[in-house]
Image (cartoon, rainbow, N blue to C red):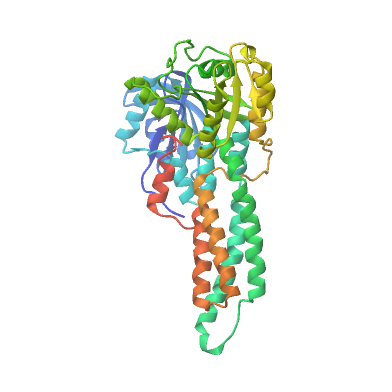
Amino acid sequence: MSKFNDTIIALATAQGISAIAVIRLSGTDSIAVTQKLFKGKNLLEQPTHTIHFGTINNGDKMIDEVLVSIFKEPNSFTKENAVEISCHGSPIIVKEIIKAFLKQGVRLAEPGEFTKRAFLQGRFDLAQAEAVADLIHAETDNARQAALNQMRGGFSNEIKRLREELIHFASLVELELDFGEEDVEFAKRDDLAILIKKIQSYLTSLIESFDQGNAIKNGIPTVIAGRPNAGKSTLLNALLNEERAIVSEIAGTTRDVIEDEMQLGGISFRFIDTAGLRETKDVIEAIGVQRTKEQMQKASLILYLFDLSTLTAREIQDDIFSLDELGIPYFKIGNKLDLVDPALIEKLAAQNFIFISASNKTNIEQLKEAILAKFKINEVKQGDVLVTNLRHYENLTQTYESLERVLYGMATDVTGDFLAMDIRQSLHYLGLITGEITTDDLLDNIFSKFCIGK
């Protein structure tokens, strides 16, 4: 367990005016330093997990009436002595209270430092610590449940158990190296192969869950694209059921990217309206067209609109060919259904078109259902294990590949030292997930993305 010599402080609730604000302190001296500014019961004599009414004072000046909650080590979030001060939610009150503590030698907390201390002192592993941030930022119920499952253990416990089994075999292989001249085999190769295949099977299920987990956590960026006047802005407004984008019959009205979000089936979709795709000499419009192409490259889904009232069959096929070249999932959406020859509808139906009238909101609900079907995501339940973090996904993939090299090595009778090296590499990647193996740069990168007071 690490020990920290200083006490940190930060506002734990959101900035701005509110009914109450909560200020957090953590560190060995957090209760003692609070007692210096608190007028009420002697906090040093009170039991842990109790709340006390009094005032916070700066010398003879009372700053505010407060409720002080105390948590004594190791029974706190950080496993250190900790204090939470509930005061009135005026920014000036918060500022004055924090200033008073800073005069007592307390330090302002860095982003995520409370959670970082909790991790470093063994409160939970690194994957669970990252889930704390995911839980705070969850925007859908599925995202909340996925983060909660990971924070409460998720795949961490199973990863640790499998890693311990692999460490056992690694130590036996390493031991064999000390008896190289005696040709002994402490680690039975058949048993090692069975264990590796079991680990790979579990890793495969985790790796395959990433697409669903990533969609739940980060949402799905969906670009609405097409030629000018195809009805892209009208479709955005119809999907959102509000006048979000300017609609005009003048080609090139949309010259920049317009974004908005909505939830469908517990998933957050970020719909992005873009400039019409065409060759243009207008400098500003040309920039918009370039941004459209960039957004299409980054999208998880493209809703491509065809103005069926004006496009020729050749133009439609040219656009479809360009979409196929992108290699990104897309829907072919035939717009202006009310203005189209029924014979064209019948001809294109065989090409999996979805036909709508964005202006009349015809078949918009059917389009939403098709989008959800494309990203079929089941409701996340308690205990479900999903990989939502790209860092975890990459480490799991690298672990699988390292284990594959171990199997190949055994199949080709490589020497024990090469076998041990690949096993150690597998253990390294597994350890990076849960935090058995860390670097300062890794921790700084992870916790810098947290809120200041968390």
The residue under the point 53% across, 34% down is 323
Between residues 177 and 119, which one lies in front from this camera angle?
A: 177
| Lateral position of residue 57 relative to residue 1, left or right | left
The residue under the point 69% across, 38% down is 381
Q: Is residue 3 above or below residue 170?
A: above
Q: Position of residue 79 (x, y in %)?
A: 50, 46
Q: Is residue 119 above or below residue 93?
A: below
* Residue at the limit of the structure toward the left, as seen here: 103
Q: Is residue 250 above or below residue 80?
A: above
Instruction: Please say whether residue 197 is visible from this viewpoint.
Output: yes
Number of numbered discs overlaid on the protein picture:
0
Q: Position of residue 78 (x, y in %)?
A: 48, 44
Between residues 396 and 51, which one lies in front from this camera angle?
A: 396
Between residues 168 and 242, which one lies in front from this camera angle?
A: 242
Q: Position of residue 55 (x, y in %)?
A: 42, 24
Q: Position of residue 389 (x, y in %)?
A: 53, 44
Between residues 317 and 229, which one lies in front from this camera angle?
A: 317
The residue under the point 45% across, 20% down is 88
Classify residue 278 by image quadrant.
Answer: top left
| Lateral position of residue 121 relative to residue 192, left or right | left
Instruction: Please say whether residue 28 is visible from this viewpoint.
Output: no
